Amino acid sequence: MRILLFSGKGGVGKTSLAAATGLELSRLGYRTLVMSVDPAHSLADAFDLETELFHGKTGDPYTINERLAIHEVNIQKEIKRHWREISAYVISVLRTTGISDVEAEELAILPGMEELSALMYVNQFRREQRYDVIVLDCAPTAESMRFVSMPTTLEWYMKHIFAFQRGLLKAVRPIANRVAPFELPSDDYFANIQNLFGRLAGIDELLEDPQITSVRLVTNPERMVLSETQRAFVYFTLHGLAVDGILVNRVLPPEVTDAYFQEWRASQARILEEIDAYFAPVPVKRIPLFTHEVLGRERLEELARALYTTGEDPAAIGRTEAPYTFAKRDGHYEIRLQLPFAAKGEVGLFKKGDELVVEIGTLRRHIGLPTSMAGLSPGRAKLENRILTVEMKES
């Protein structure tokens, strides 16, 4: 099974590109699911489905054609299916504060429930071998980071906190409930958590396997959008996910020659040059701005033709190795950068803002730094076996 994860800043068009990719995959014969992980779902809107028809079946995959289904995770249904005890306890606590029942039920939808529910479905479909490819239409960048980091966070909690917390509360619950302003969680609450964790078992390995999961970052040729795409690239790399494509959407096509767009064209040309330089060697695709809104199956198929060349397989594995990785060894931070064609004496390093700039002859690579390393400067560097290791230290 393949998992294609589409992420990017809100409004860049990732839902349309994910939907178009799903259609192309189904045309090529893959059993495909496009799943929306964004709480503000727009997948059904992209296919221009009638609201009443679609949302009457929401919560389960909805068939588009014989090889394609779409799925918008419905958190209200997921609470009834998977989060019943946890939600019931949170609601009971909120009620003690004087909040009305309706408000309590709304507030009991905790951050992460939707993302974890989607991960459980991915794991379930993998075990059932129901689909060949799952395309994930993710929430904007920050929520996408939470989506991919949740399995690791939950695993740490289960290993280090869960058993102790469950055992402690089991011992003190009868006494504490007599004096506490609200009842402590019952053992059913912890059983619910344990059951959820079981449903997620192995999902972190699935996401970090480049033979299975690939990230496609969607951006626009605009400065503010590019900055967020660069940060997303850094953090997906930091989390061990393989980014094998950058999709630059809404590029002005050559036939737009009106003087009104002259400044836009010059600006886009500068940004596109930066994109090619920053993300190399990750492939960059350019998708033109259409003359109309991309809405409905026919126009999504038109978008797919612009996105994929004849004979191209969207499920094909692009890159399996990250262009660079971050590590902490012997108390200091390191960046390891693949430089297959570099020779000693050709490499130059300097810091620019929160980026490390690497110069190799006439080429230049910009490496965005995670927050923990943004205040550090490059120190010693060594090139061995086509890998450049740069030690980062305090200025």
Image (cartoon, helix red, strand yellow):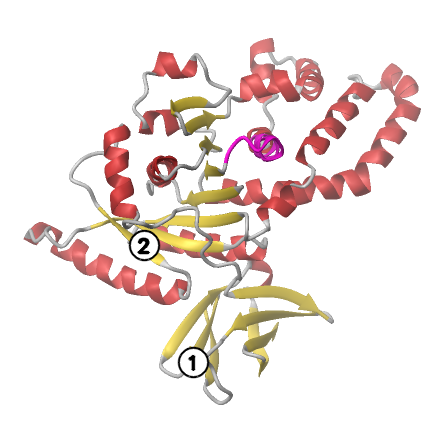
Residue at 55% in and 29% down: 114
- Which numbered disc, 2 or 1, marks the residue closer to the eye? 2
In the picture as drawn, the residue positioned furthest to the left comes out as 258
**Residue on which disc 1 sits:** 360
Contact (CB < 8 A) between labels 2 and 1?
no
Residue extent of the magenta highlight: 118-131
Tell me which corner region of the image, top left, top right, bottom left or bottom right, holds residue 223: bottom left
- Return the residue nearer the eye: 10 or 242: 242
> Residue 216 — which label?
none
- Return the residue nearer the eye: 390 or 324: 324
**Residue on which disc 2 sits:** 285
Instruction: Specify whether 268 is left or right of 3.
Output: left
Residue 160 point in image, percent of width and height: 81, 43
Residue at 53% in and 62% down: 321
Residue 95 point in image, percent of width and height: 67, 13
Residue 187 point in image, percent of width and height: 82, 21
> Vertical placement of 243 versus 369: above or below?
above
Instruction: Specify whether 109 is left or right of 154.
Output: left
Give the residue type that dot 2 points to: Lys
**SS at badge 1:** strand
Instruction: Specify whether 326 is left or right of 232.
Output: right
- In which quadrant will I find the C terminus? bottom right
The residue carrying pointer 1 sits among few (fewer than 14), some (14 to 19) or many (20 or more) residues within 10 Å by Cα, namely some
Whether residue 395 appears in this view of the structure is no
> Vertical placement of 178 versus 308: above or below?
above
> Vertical placement of 324 versus 39: above or below?
below
The residue carrying pointer 2 sits among few (fewer than 14), some (14 to 19) or many (20 or more) residues within 10 Å by Cα, namely some
Instruction: Say whether residue 282 is magenta.
Output: no
Whether residue 262 appears in this view of the structure is yes
- Return the residue nearer the eye: 162 or 197: 197
Give the residue type that dot 1 points to: Ile
- In which quadrant will I find the N terminus? top right
